[in-house]
Image (cartoon, rainbow, N blue to C red):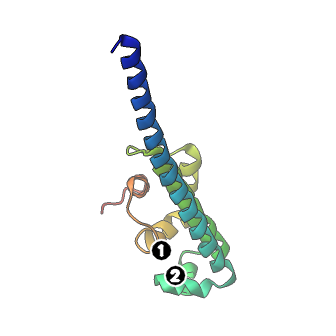
Amino acid sequence: MDIISIASASIAIIAAIISIWSLYEQRRVSKLNANIAFLNVGHNQLLNNPSLLELHNIGSSDLEECMLTADEFVYILNSFYAGQGYYFIEKTKNIHLSEYRRNLLRNAKVKMAWIKLIRNKMFAESSYSKAIDHFYDLKN
């Protein structure tokens, strides 16, 4: 075999590996996008029927305690899921929260919603949730 044949075969193998990896990544991102879209549809149902929160062991008195309307709660919840999706797609382990995100987190209602309602009842642990916990100086 000459050098051109070896180079061609090597390039073909590398291209195949890249294609397989790209397909895997595209499937991973597509699954995440579908999951977030379905979550948002479910969350938006809370706007018309806040009693659905009881399925997550959250009552109307919990929203009142956090001084939240159902609209505000769903907005905050969707915002957290959008942020989680962004960092998951990026495969970011060491998360640096943007000023946009930190500004939202500084709101007292958002903090109370995270701590009392969202963190342990509606959100899975991830690098993103740990970054939010760190922002609030929460110890798990």
Closer to the chain start, of discs 1 and 2, is 2
Q: Nearer the viewer, residue 10 or 31?
A: 10
- Residue drawn 47% across the image and 81% down it: 56
| Residue density around tag 2, few if under 14, some if 14–19, many if 20 or more, within 10 Å | some
Local secondary structure at mark 1? helix
Query: Disc 2 designates what residue?
Result: 62
Quarter of the figure with the C terminus = bottom left
Q: Position of residue 100 (x, y in %)?
A: 59, 47
Q: Position of residue 35 (x, y in %)?
A: 54, 64
Q: Amino acid at mark 1?
A: Leu
Quarter of the figure with the N terminus = top left
Q: Is residue 50 above or below residue 90?
A: below
Residue occupying the far top of the picture: 3
Q: Position of residue 99 (x, y in %)?
A: 56, 44
Q: Position of residue 115 (x, y in %)?
A: 44, 68
- Residue drawn 43% across the image and 46% down it: 91
Q: Which mark is residue 117?
A: 1
77 relative to 124 in the view: left or right:
right
Res. 76 visible in picture: no
Q: Quadrant of residue 94?
A: top left
Is there CB contact under 8 Å for labels 1 and 2?
A: yes
9 relative to 103 in the view: left or right:
left
